[in-house]
């Protein structure tokens, strides 16, 4: 028989997925309410304090790196020496990403846990949501990444410390992360490092960066990121014409623009910035993370950071 805690978590997960089976959701909510009333009454009779935990199972306070398969995330993960490394996979990643994951596992000397939404791809998600992007972000971030992170948190309760690969140009993102997720601790091991330094550390370690960087993209996002601008989409049209064609068809079917200016099939070649600008896509593209790491975690990760950087230090001029 399920405990009230397990019923509560099951209901929370059902709401998170926004199941189309509303009758199932309503039935579970009704059952949960009755169980809550029964347990509350029983506890009051026994003089036991009411407790309605959001998650079941033993609490663990882990240092967790949410690995994005980007260069900065890789160096931050190596520096922090976390208890667990988690990567959320999406079908739209460049195939070279999986080579990079394997190389990083050897470098970290730790298995990378892979999570994946049953929706699988950006297109599946946008079609299911009937929109592409809006003022509060994109459904691919919410349903492919954020939702999987929340499900993991439900199954792994605790006041964890999350490791993020923000560099010296992303201090505002780090502060936004702290405000957006105050229920967790957060550690930014490369916050005082430049992007060139970070790339140099990876090169010095003998690890080839993901191919998307060498193709001229600023990060290892999904191919055909919905947050890209005109310059980005003109480059995607040249490098990945089949992705450009599918995203163009998706726009017309959904009736929504990826770009503010026009539909993709109306985009003139040559429009947009010469320098490709598209934000790095982590779990929190729209909102980002929380509280400073606790003293014990900070001490451990700081010592690890010092050792790792001393071993892999490079001159900025030698960095790609």
Image (cartoon, rainbow, N blue to C red):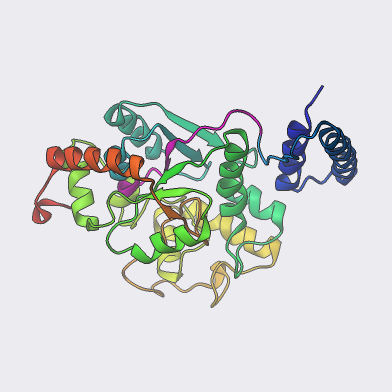
Residue 176 locus on image (x, y percent):
45, 63
Vertical order, 271 against 57 (above or below): below
Residue 174 locus on image (x, y percent):
39, 59
Is 71 one of the magenta-colored residues? yes
Q: Which residue is painted at 50% across and 58% down in the image?
A: 285
Residue 161 locus on image (x, y percent):
43, 43
- From the viewer's perspective, is 214 left or right of 118? left
Vertical order, 171 against 157 (above or below): below
- From the viewer's perspective, is 17 left or right of 170? right
Q: Which residue extends farthest front?
A: 47
* Residue 282 in sight in this render: yes
Quadrant of the frame with the N terminus:
top right
When asked about the image quadrant of residue 104, the answer is top left
Decide which of 293, 134 is in the foreground and name it. 293
Q: Which residue extends farthest top?
A: 1
Count of numbered labels shown in the rendering: 0
Decide which of 36, 27 is in the foreground and name it. 36
Residue 109 locus on image (x, y percent):
30, 26
Decide which of 102, 78 is in the foreground and name it. 78
Is 148 one of the magenta-colored residues? no
- From the viewer's perspective, is 271 left or right of 76? right
- From the viewer's perspective, is 95 left or right of 264? left
The residue segment tinted magenta is 56-73
Q: Which residue is painted at 61% across and 46% down in the image?
A: 147
* Residue 121 in sight in this render: no
Q: Which residue is painted at 40% across and 34% down in the image?
A: 98
Q: Which residue is painted at 74% across and 39% down in the image?
A: 49
Decide which of 318, 178 is in the foreground and name it. 178
């Amino acid at each position: 028989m399920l405990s009230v805690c397990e019923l509560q978590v099951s209901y929370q997960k059902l709401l998170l997925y926004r199941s189309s089976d509303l009758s199932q959701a309503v039935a579970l909510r009704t059952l949960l309410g009755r169980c809550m009333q029964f347990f509350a009454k029983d506890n009051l009779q026994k003089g036991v304090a009411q407790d309605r935990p959001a998650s079941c199972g033993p609490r663990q306070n882990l240092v967790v790196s949410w690995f994005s398969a980007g260069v900065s995330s890789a160096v931050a993960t190596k520096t922090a020496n976390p208890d667990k490394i988690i990567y959320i996979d999406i079908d739209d990643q460049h195939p070279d990403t999986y080579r990079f994951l394997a190389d990083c596992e050897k470098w970290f000397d730790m298995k990378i846990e892979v999570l994946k939404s049953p929706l699988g791809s950006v297109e599946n998600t946008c079609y299911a949501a009937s929109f592409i992007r809006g003022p509060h972000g994109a459904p691919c971030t919410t349903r492919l990444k954020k939702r999987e992170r929340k499900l993991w948190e439900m199954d792994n309760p605790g006041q964890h410390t999350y490791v993020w690969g923000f560099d010296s140009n992303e201090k505002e993102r780090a502060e936004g992360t702290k405000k957006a997720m105050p229920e967790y601790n957060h550690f930014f091991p490369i916050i005082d490092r430049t992007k060139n330094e970070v790339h140099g550390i990876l090169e010095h370690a003998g690890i080839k960066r993901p191919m998307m960087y060498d193709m001229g993209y600023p990060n290892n996002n999904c191919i055909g990121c919905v947050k890209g601008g005109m310059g980005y989409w003109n480059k995607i049209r040249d490098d990945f014409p089949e992705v450009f064609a599918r995203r163009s068809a998706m726009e017309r079917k959904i009736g929504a623009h990826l770009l503010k200016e026009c539909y993709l099939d109306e985009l003139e070649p040559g429009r947009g910035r010469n320098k490709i600008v598209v934000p790095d896509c982590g779990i929190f593209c729209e909102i980002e993370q929380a509280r400073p790491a606790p003293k014990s975690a900070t001490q451990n990760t700081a010592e690890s950071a010092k050792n790792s950087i001393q071993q892999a230090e490079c001159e900025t001029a030698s960095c790609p």
